[in-house]
Amino acid sequence: MTTPNKTPPGADPKQLERTGTVREIGSQAVWSLSSCKPGFGVDQLRDDNLETYWQSDGSQPHLVNIQFRRKTTVKTLCIYADYKSDESYTPSKISVRVGNNFHNLQEIRQLELVEPSGWIHVPLTDTHKKPIRTFMIQIAVLANHQNGRDTHMRQIKVYTPVEESSIA
């Protein structure tokens, strides 16, 4: 088990972007979900509004699949969760998996969340602390607080490092 990066509680990942070291690349991916209630799907998960959310509608694990058209360098995954608003719908155990496709995904992080409130920063790095290169990321909600069945996720952001320019 690993715990998410220690960032200020609820730190907005847009602050990461302002440093110029990373950029959000979720719009370059094809997103899919294992299930969702009508009106609570990918659009709500990606709309930059912390008041909206994806709500699953089925049995666990609940899956968010993020597929890139080409092998992509990813450094950080940011997930917004709010226990005070979502209670038993709030994820308590999440698995992050990467691979080329659905058939060869490997877990690289498993997180235990205790009443999260705000942005959870998940480093996507190899054993040498280098950003990973992958075609696909899968986020699996394995358990919710209070043994809840369906889950809420309010936002997910995917960040790539910004390459240093050699042009003076």
Image (cartoon, grey):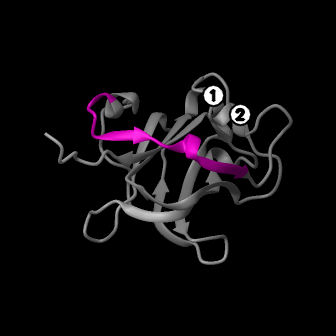
Question: Which residue corresponds to the image point at 55% horizontal and 55% vertical from the top-left?
Answer: 93
Residue with the mark numbered 2 = 43
The reply to whether the C-beta atoms of the residues labelled 1 and 2 are less than 8 Å apart is yes
State which quadrant residue 119 falls in: top left
Whether residue 139 appears in this view of the structure is: yes
Question: Which residue corresponds to the image point at 65% horizontal and 45% vertical from the top-left?
Answer: 146
Q: Amino acid at mark 1?
A: Asp
For residue 47, the mark is: 1
Question: Which residue corresponds to the image point at 51% horizontal and 70% vertical from the top-left?
Answer: 107
State which quadrant residue 90 falls in: top right
In the image, which residues are magenta?
18-32
Q: Quadrant of the C terminus?
A: top left
Q: Nearer the viewer, residue 45 or 93?
A: 45
Q: Is residue 93 above or below residue 9?
A: below
Q: How many residues crowd mark 2 within 10 Å: few (<14), some (14–19), many (20+)?
A: some
Q: Is residue 151 above or below residue 44?
A: below
Q: CA distance from mark 1 to mark 2?
A: 6 Å
- The residue furthest front is 167
